[in-house]
Image (cartoon, rainbow, N blue to C red):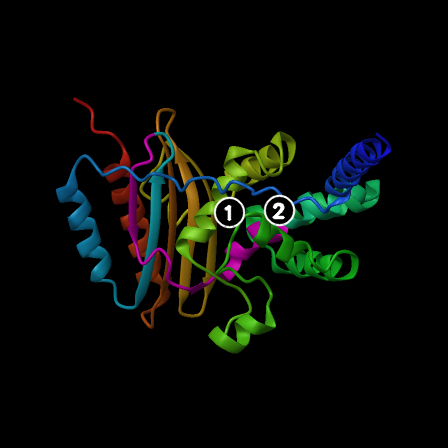
């Protein structure tokens, strides 16, 4: 009888110890589901798409394009993952970093400074404003830019990076596809929220630069950010005609005089818009 009680007691004790061990064991980190990639839809007019790609191939230099109708997901792309200098389009990432990581803890006077510098960067592409914000980021939160790149999963984009300069000869580089993600992030308002995104969209729609994406799209709302360096010309933006929302990201490098790339971007942007816009019956 005593032996049976002892065995029963031992089994109960063993069960309790096992249960405690399971409760105190480290928990496995749950797997985070990666959102599925955007399912690109074919263009209804494949012939116009092929003609556009052939035109891109004729560019005297390097050119990359990523464009998508955000309503239909129809996509047009060429060298979309090629590395290019960002030129002034890197100001988009700096503005996002300020609003996301520095603005929440800033004083009233600091917020006013941030707002004014971002406005100058978006509307007139002001370089002193850009460098002042870079210095502030470096002093207050040096990881803000890399956190934005990580948040948006931008694996090929580098902003004000010594490593990028060593590898590419420019401190800031990106791809047409990745900078399109930056612009779409601003447009869809999910990352920064409605208030900050609305500020950026308003400023980007009032930029003084009208020579590239907007040139042949008069009468349509265009939000965009241009960039230019010697031998580098680019523009990324969204055309919203009230029915279609078409995202275009175009980057070029060339030895031709500056009007060549600007003219090419303007022409290709209009043709890309028309190719991605559903044809009316």
- Write the start and end of the magenta stretch as one range: 72-96
Residue 209 in the image, given as x and y percentages of width and height: 46, 48
Left or right, residue 54 beside residue 187: left
**Mark 2 = which residue?**
96
Q: Quadrant of residue 11?
A: top right
Residue 93 percent across, percent down from the top left: 58, 52
With respect to residue 50, does 222 lie above or below? above
Asked whether disc 2 touches disc 1, contact meaning CB atoms under 8 Å apart, the reply is yes
Element carrying mark 2: helix
Along the polypeptide, which appears first: circle 2 or circle 1? 2
Q: CA distance from mark 2 to mark 1?
A: 9 Å
Rendered residue at 83%/36% (across/down): 3
Q: Secondary structure at mark 1?
A: helix
Query: Which quadrant is the N terminus positioned in?
Result: top right
Residue 208 in sight: no
Q: Residues within 10 Å of mark 2 (few under 14, many from 20)?
A: many
Q: How many marks?
A: 2
Tag shown at residue 182: 1
Q: Taking 15 as reference, is 79 above or below it?
A: below
């Amino acid at each position: 009888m005593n032996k049976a009680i002892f065995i029963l007691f031992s089994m109960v004790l063993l069960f309790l110890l096992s249960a405690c061990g399971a409760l105190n064991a480290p928990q496995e980190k749950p797997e985070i589901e990666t959102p599925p990639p955007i399912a690109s839809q074919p263009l209804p007019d494949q012939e116009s798409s092929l003609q556009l790609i052939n035109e891109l191939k004729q560019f005297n230099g390097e050119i990359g394009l990523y464009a998508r109708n955000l309503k239909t997901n129809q996509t047009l792309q060429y060298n979309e993952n090629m590395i290019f200098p960002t030129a002034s389009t890197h100001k988009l990432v700096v503005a996002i970093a300020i609003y996301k990581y520095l603005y929440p803890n800033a004083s009233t006077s600091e917020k006013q400074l941030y707002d004014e510098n971002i406005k100058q960067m978006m509307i007139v592409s002001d370089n002193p404003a850009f460098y002042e914000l870079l210095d502030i980021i470096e002093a207050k939160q040096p990881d803000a830019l890399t956190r934005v790149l990580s948040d948006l999963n931008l694996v090929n984009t580098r902003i004000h990076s010594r490593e990028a300069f060593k590898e590419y000869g420019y401190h800031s580089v990106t791809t047409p596809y990745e900078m399109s993600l930056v612009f779409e992030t601003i447009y869809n308002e999910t990352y920064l929220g409605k208030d900050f995104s609305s500020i950026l969209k308003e400023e980007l729609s009032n930029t003084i630069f009208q020579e590239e994406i907007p040139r042949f799209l008069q009468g349509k709302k265009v939000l965009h950010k241009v960039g230019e360096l010697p031998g580098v010309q680019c523009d990324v933006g969204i055309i919203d005609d009230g029915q279609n929302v078409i995202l275009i990201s175009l980057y070029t490098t060339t030895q031709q005089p500056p009007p060549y790339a600007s003219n090419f971007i303007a022409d290709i942007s209009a043709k890309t818009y028309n190719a991605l816009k559903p044809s009316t019956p």
